[in-house]
Amino acid sequence: MDLQDIRKELDQVDNQIIDLYFKRMELCTKIAEYKKSHDTRIFDPKREDEKIASVTSKANNELDKESLSLLFKLLMDQSKKLQKELINK
């Protein structure tokens, strides 16, 4: 496998990540609708802590643990931003 082949495969993985991100945001829209209709707070620190613990438990090493933590904190921040926009409409 040469560099071009590896990059092509990496591009495919990147496209899957993008598709999954959009799917995640779609689900976050449904969460926002639920929270709005049930007058539930957007930020749930317990849920976020549990999610980070769950995700980082799958890491192979400390670098992966830190990277996964950062990635999911960013995803959750984007989710909260989207929810806030939708709920405050």
Image (cartoon, grey):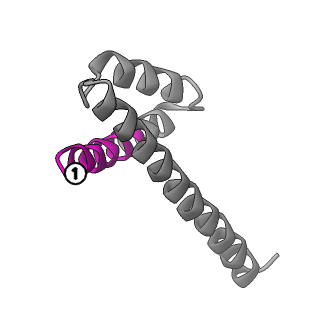
Query: Which residue, as the protein is rendered here, is positioned at the far right?
Result: 1
> Image point 23% across, 25% down: which residue?
41
Numbered circles on residues, count: 1
Residue 47, image x, y percentages:
38, 20
> Image point 33% across, 15% down: which residue?
46
**In the rendered structure, does residue 24 fall within the stretch colored magenta?**
no
> Image point 41% across, 40% down: which residue?
72
Residue on which the image places disc 1: 85
Q: Nearer the viewer, residue 70 or 15?
A: 15
SS label for mark 1 = helix
The dominant secondary structure in magenta is: helix
**In the rendered structure, does residue 87 fall within the stretch colored magenta?**
yes
* Residue 61 image-quadrant placement: top right
Amino acid type, callout 1? Glu
Q: Nearer the viewer, residue 49 or 68?
A: 49
Residue 54, image x, y percentages:
52, 22
Query: Which residue, as the protein is rendered here, is positioned at the far bottom?
Result: 4
Question: Could you tell whether 24 is left or right of 13 in the image?
Answer: left
* Residue 52 image-quadrant placement: top left
Question: Could you tell whether 6 is left or right of 59 in the image?
Answer: right
Residue 74, image x, y percentages:
33, 46
Magenta stretch bounds:
71-89
Specify the quadrant that holds the N terminus.
bottom right
